[in-house]
Amino acid sequence: MKREASGCGSKPRRRGPFPDVTLEHVRVSCAHCANAECIKECPTGATFRAEDGFVLITQERCIGCGTCVDACPYGARYMRQVGQMLKADKCAWCYARVYEGQKPVCVEKCITGALLFGLSSDPAIKAALEEPGVDVYHPEYNTKPQLYRKSPRPRHNDVKVLAPNAAPSSMKHRAWAGEGHGRTCPKAAANTSTG
Ligand code: SF4
Ligand code: SF4
Ligand code: SF4
């Protein structure tokens, strides 16, 4: 089981057969899969899908077993200390911000505009999804991830699209703040604090 907190970072990935191998850095964060293994494996229901399609964690129900960390084929989950316990965490697509009509922090702060976030019905998102080379990470896992990326790509011209299923207007407000879903990821918080 992975126990270290990893935030929402990137991982190096080798691409292509030898000798035409390239190394690229792939953003690895929760893809809010439509067929999410983490939801299936969580024994307490702490991991669940919201009505709008987001995959979220109710921290109060998390017993820190780490099953979801092992179940996620992307390594998108990690454990973090909450009081005396370790609890699971992951990218929540800045749920509270999106609910309020804002963009996720990483999308807003990215200095090259490499990140896009929105509905697949949005013309800009739709156009990005139709660009050559846009795909999901490891489609063979059959988790139906909703985090897309463009590859291969020239440096600083990457396109990643986070596209939840339903319109934000359909989101039903819940006690997210009390459940901890409004937090930002550690890296995003650090980026925010340093401007
Ligand atoms: S990326 Fe991993 S943690 Fe996120 S929904 Fe998919 S299986 Fe779950
Ligand atoms: S660590 Fe928490 S969220 Fe993950 S499977 Fe266990 S109870 Fe569910
Ligand atoms: S800033 Fe929000 S959307 Fe971006 S990686 Fe962190 S939690 Fe996920």
Image (cartoon, rainbow, N blue to C red):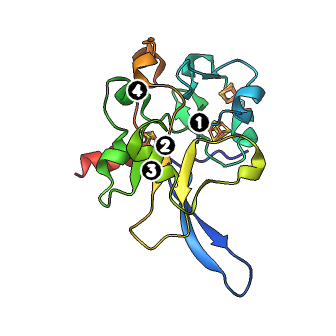
Query: What kind of element bears circle 3?
Result: helix
Of helix, strand and loop, which one carries label 2? strand
Q: Amino acid at mark 4?
A: Gly
Q: Is residue 28 left or right of residue 168?
A: right
* Residue visible at 71% across and 88% down in the picture: 19
Per the model, the C-alpha gap separating discs 4 and 3 is: 29 Å
Q: Nearer the viewer, residue 94 or 148?
A: 148
Tell me if mark 3 has few (under 14), some (14-19) or many (20+) residues whose alpha carbon lies within 10 angstroms of its own: few
Note whether ligand 3 is within 8 Å of mark 2. yes
Residue 87 is drawn in which quadrant? Answer: top right
Which residue position is annotated with label 2? 162
Identify the amino acid type marked 1.
Answer: His
1 or 2: mark nearer the eye = 2
Q: Which mark is residue 127?
A: 3
Residue 143 x/y as whole percent:
72, 40
What is the number of the mark on residue 32?
A: 1
State how far apart marks 4 and 1 are (Cα): 16 Å
Residues under labels 2 and 3: Cα distance?
13 Å
Seen in the image, is 156 located left or right of residue 135? left
Spatial CA distance of label 2 from label 4 is 18 Å
Quadrant field for ligand 2: top right
Using the numbered discs, state the Cα–Cα distance from disc 1 to disc 2 in whole angstroms: 9 Å
Report if the CB atoms under discs 4 and 1 are less than 8 Å apart.
no
Question: What residue is disc 4 on?
Answer: 182
**SS at mark 4?**
loop
Foreground mark, 2 or 4, reads: 2
> Mark 4 or mark 2, which is nearer the start of the sequence?
2
The disc at residue 20 is none
In the picture, the quarter occupied by the N terminus is top right
Q: Nearer the viewer, mark 2 or mark 3?
A: 3
